[in-house]
Image (cartoon, rainbow, N blue to C red):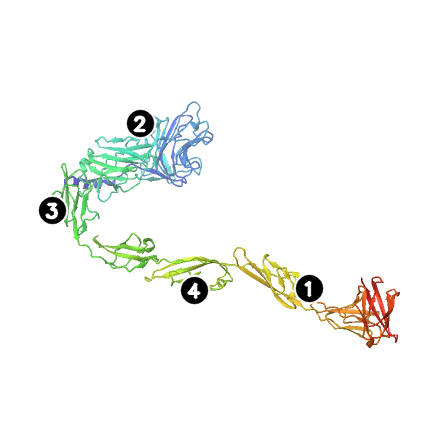
Amino acid sequence: MTGKIIFLAFFTILLGEVQAQKSLKFDGVNDEVQISGYRGITGRGARTIEAWVKFSSNATNDQIVVWGTNSTGQKWTIRLDGSNGNALRAEINGGNIIGSTNLKDSKWHHVAVVWSNDGSPNISDAKLYVDGVREIIAKSNSRSLNTGNGAIVKLGNGFASNQSFEGQMDEVRIWSAALTEARLRDWMCKEVISSHPDYSNLQGYWKMDTLAGTTLKDYKGSRNGSIRNGASWQNDGGPIGTASIHRYSSSAAISLKHLDGDSAVVSGWTGKPEGVHLYRRDARPNHSGLPSLSKSIDSSRHYGVFVVKGSSPTYKLDYYYSPNKHYVKYGACSNYLLSRADNSVKTWSMTTASNTAGTFSLSSQKPGEYLIGYGTGGVIITAPNNKDTSAICSGDSIQLSNSTTGFTYQWLRNGSPISGATQGTLTTADSGLYNLIIVGGSCSDTSNTLTLLTKNNPVVTLSGYSAVCASEFSIPFAGGSPSGGTYTSPYASGNIFVIKSAGPGFHKITYEYVDQFGCRDTASQQLEVLNLPQVSLAPKLPVCLDSSSHNLTGGMPTGGIYSINGTTSVSFDATSLGSGKHWIKYTYTDSNNCASSDSNEAEVLALPNVVLSLIKNSFCEYDKDWTLDGQNPSGGVYNGNGVNGFDFSPTKAGAGSHEISYTVTDNITGCKNAAKDTIVVTARPAKPAITQVGDSLKVTPAFDHRWFTLVGGVPGATSSSIRPAEEGEYYARVQNKEGCWSLNSDTIFYKPTGVNELNSDVEVTIYPNPSSGILQFRSFNPKMYQFRVVSIEGKEVLNGSIKNDEEIDLNSIKNGIYFVHFTDKNNGIKSLRLILHK
């Protein structure tokens, strides 16, 4: 190793000092900077205001720079507009102009507002820039501009109490000239110095880089600011360098060269950025935390890349560092390119840059900063585990490497050069102590020592698996020895084998065990997943709810088990199951104890809902046929004694109680159901007999009675006896409690007890009565009788004599009611009422 390493150790001590890359943080409540005595650009003077800002996530309408008089057209304010996309806004009280880029993204942005008087001074003439790109104006409210001098310049606060700045601010510049777009781009990423073409128009320049105190220094003149209410210094800021170069609307490479001759080149853009700035800061970085391999850094300079918009843009960085005088003086063979995302990052990171012939190269880079790191311990060789001792297993090899390229290399094993090992990497399978010597010009380094051990592989076994049925979901992996290894299979999920995914067949399961040295061995077994038996169940036709219970059939192969709705069963009982759909499952288990099943849906059909409530259900045996009614639904069939179709015949049914059924068949399902009702047919009461007792006529007692003469019913005569008002022939009929009437009794001739009637042994009768013209006479005595036919008016219309079995011809008299009086030789009288109807 050369003597350069001694100097690096000394340089590490000097890194305690830090410079530049600072900013001022405002709390969004009342923090502000007042530029005492300075009232900004007033009237209608041309102006440009620049600043680097990084808004917090809570920012809304935060003020950046404010001065003037809070009257129409006389205020000058630059702020964030939280109501219009968090864009840049310039306003003058009564007029404004608003950009379109969202600034509240937690990133640093360069903002600028440029205005000049074109003869009709109006705020709408202002030009807004974000990161060097002129803004598309989203909204504008025209107003004549004439800035007043009522208030001094403030940073971070303004006239409104709720518009304080929350975030970080850096590099504020106020110019009394309208800077061009090119001028803004040329100087936005580097500090302003006197060579700036518009330097004479620079009114105030506040770098915000002192990191202490309550005075904000003006680097142009004496317009120092007063930091008020706790605005705090921050040890990071915008991407500002000592020198910079940019490219907009072009993908061409850009290069920035130091006076020493070293240079950085940015090229190979992707993501179509709108602009790119490459800057270099000729000072120590604000933060210098280093990765372990780097012991010191190039404190004289570092480079940075700032990108404007684009879609995840990347680039290639090449740093030609050989002419760098700091490197020439302090660098060693083991140099590294370090990077950080921005200057707020406190610790630099090691990059994967190639290092060839004094050039670091990196591809696919995002915006960031870069510097050289020096390694004081010589070149470092590493194994994949990044440790000084590494183990490999029998039969394996390992690659040793270092981070340099472009040198001359020689690998050593156990202190002796390895023949032919002259590359930057070495692949070996031998144990031993390894070193690497690198040579580049007058620089020579010997690496650290890396110990390589060779270990025997473990002996691994895996027990066999018993066959499993394809119906199982999974089984746990087991049987691997030594324990603690890993099972693999295309059908593994964690520590289980998923049978459902694998399916029937033989499946390989591998068990791998890795010991503490990383040595491994594997063992495998085949797991057989058995096919399930092919099971089928024939469909079952729908059955009616009243169908009889029957054994379940149709499952193949035979010998399985049936279940209905999850309950094992051998028969199908529709009545117990109830109407609706039911699942029949047939499960068959084969000789491997693997089971499979098939299922069908069987339907029990509901019976039609039938109602029978007969409108009339009580009859007498002599009633006419009756049409049955009271059924629902229609379309059914009646059955029962005396039933013919829909008619019921009491006479055919006969006396008694008769069950009548009404059956309906569902036209769709064919299921039948019946409803029943009862008809009671009551027999006709027995024909009554009439007797005369004194002046009364009596009939067989019953529930109800009716009395009649030959001319009609006797009014009010409803009891079992009556006392007639006149002599004549009478008959009666009786009714039982069911409302059925008897046949008419025989007629009886009623004669009051004061009249001498014929003896009973000379009783006479006439028939038929009523008569159609010929009247038969019958006597139980063969003697001759005299007869007289008298009208109801008392006029005799016919007379004569007659004896037993002779006829009286009535055709000569007209229809009507007559009395026929019979007398015998003893003057006995028998009077009978006669109805003549021819």
Task: Say which mark, if any, is on residue 196.
Answer: 2
Mark 1–mark 3 Cα distance, whole angstroms, equals 138 Å
Task: Say which mark, if any, is on residue 623.
Answer: 1
771 to the left or right of 268: right
Q: Earlier in the sequence, mark 3 or mark 4?
A: 3
Q: Label 3: which residue?
A: 415
Mark 2–mark 1 Cα distance, whole angstroms, equals 134 Å
746 to the left or right of 503: right
Q: Nearer the viewer, residue 88 or 625?
A: 625
| Residue 479, picture quadrant | bottom left
Q: Secondary structure at mark 4?
A: loop
Mark 4 residue crowding within 10 angstroms, few (<14) / some (14–19) / many (20+)? few
Q: Label 4: which residue?
A: 570
Q: Earlier in the sequence, mark 1 or mark 3?
A: 3
Disc 2 versus disc 4: nearer the observer: 4
| Residue 225, picture quadrant | top left
Disc 1 versus disc 4: nearer the observer: 1
Disc 1 versus disc 3: nearer the observer: 1
Residue 758 position (above or below residue 30): below
Q: Earlier in the sequence, mark 2 or mark 3?
A: 2
Name the kind of residue labelled 4 in the image: Val
Q: Secondary structure at mark 3?
A: loop
Mark 3–mark 4 Cα distance, whole angstroms, equals 88 Å
Mark 2 near mark 3, Cβ–Cβ under 8 Å? no
Mark 1–mark 4 Cα distance, whole angstroms, equals 55 Å
**What is the x, y in percent for residue 305?**
29, 35
Name the kind of residue labelled 1 in the image: Asp
Mark 2 near mark 1, Cβ–Cβ under 8 Å? no
Q: Secondary structure at mark 2?
A: loop
